[in-house]
Image: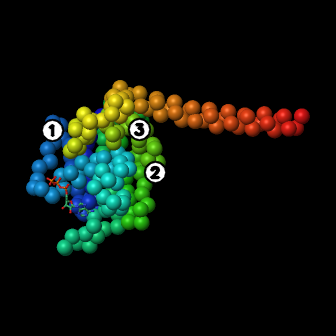
């Protein structure tokens, strides 16, 4: 799987549609302070499902929408598209090209699309879980992350290792199955009570 391009429209300082192509080799983003380099990385994390407004340097999610400048009015919508080459089927999705889209409106409404089909946040998270490209992965090392890993508690460090080892997905599925099992046991208990009352 390869990152092909990232498109930003109305996201933070990128009012106009801006496309960044990731060509073979290393891509560097250079520019003066405040020119929007970190905003590009935030757009990447955001389209992969980032839910922490604080880590996006905002107070509420619509803060990622272009807030206006001296010469331009604020916009009402932000959209980020991430285009991936999946011809090696690294992602468990039957398409050579995968496009993830995330949109948000001023009123806070937002949506995710996978190849132009509406999906849930959960679908995006599951698609990338254990691939190394999830929002919590090491593919994106932001400022302060190395320090936070060194300073993390053993339990927190274990989660990082589980993500790398690819067991996080199975752990989540196990938790979900255990929850359903508990609910089913409760229902069965209730049925047993009713049967006892009837006879
Ligand atoms: P540095 O080199 O100092 O880390 P940088 O190139 O990483 O800077 P960013 O932090 O990505 O720059 O961009 C900051 C700029 O983005 C600021 O000028 C800020 O005003 C602008 N910005 C952030 N959010 C918005 C928004 N919602 N609307 C418009 N501009 C925004």
Depth check, mark 2 against mark 3: the one in front is 3
Alpha-carbon neighbours of circle 1 within 10 Å: few (<14), some, or many (≥20)? few
Mark closer to the chain start, 2 or 3: 2
Q: Residue at x 60, y 35 (%)?
A: 180
**Residue 36 image point, x, y percent:** 18, 56
**Residue 68 image point, x, y percent:** 25, 69
Mark 2 to mark 3: distance in Å?
A: 14 Å
What element does badge 3 sit on?
helix
Name of the residue lying farthest toward the right: 199
Q: Is mark 2 within 8 Å of ligand 1?
A: no
Question: Which label was assigned to residue 194?
Answer: none
108 vs 55, nearest the viewer: 55
Position of 134 relative to 108 (above/below): above
Q: Quickly name the residue at label 3.
A: 127
Q: Is residue 172 left or right of residue 162?
A: right
Q: Is mark 1 within 8 Å of ligand 1?
A: no
Q: Quickly name the residue at label 1.
A: 26
Mark closer to the chain start, 3 or 1: 1
Q: Quickly name the residue at label 2.
A: 118
Alpha-carbon neighbours of circle 3 within 10 Å: few (<14), some, or many (≥20)? some
């Amino acid at each position: 799987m390869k990152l092909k391009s990232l498109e930003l429209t109305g996201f933070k300082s990128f009012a106009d549609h801006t496309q960044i192509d990731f060509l073979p080799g290393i891509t560097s983003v250079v520019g003066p302070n405040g020119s929007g380099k970190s905003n590009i990385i935030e757009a990447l994390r955001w389209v992969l499902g980032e839910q922490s407004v604080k880590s996006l340097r905002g107070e509420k999610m619509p803060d990622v929408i272009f807030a206006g400048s001296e010469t331009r009015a604020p916009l009402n919508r932000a959209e980020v598209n991430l285009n991936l080459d999946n011809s090696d089927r690294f992602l468990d999705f039957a398409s050579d090209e995968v496009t993830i889209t995330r949109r948000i409106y001023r009123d806070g409404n937002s949506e995710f699309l996978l190849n132009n089909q509406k999906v849930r946040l959960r679908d995006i998270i599951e698609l990338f879980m254990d691939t190394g490209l999830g929002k919590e992965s090491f593919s994106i090392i932001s400022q302060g992350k190395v320090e936070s890993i060194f300073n993390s508690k053993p339990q927190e460090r274990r989660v990082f290792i589980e993500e790398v080892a690819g067991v996080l997905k199975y752990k989540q599925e196990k938790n979900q199955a255990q929850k359903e099992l508990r609910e089913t046991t409760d229902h069965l208990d209730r049925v047993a009570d009713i049967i006892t009352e009837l006879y």
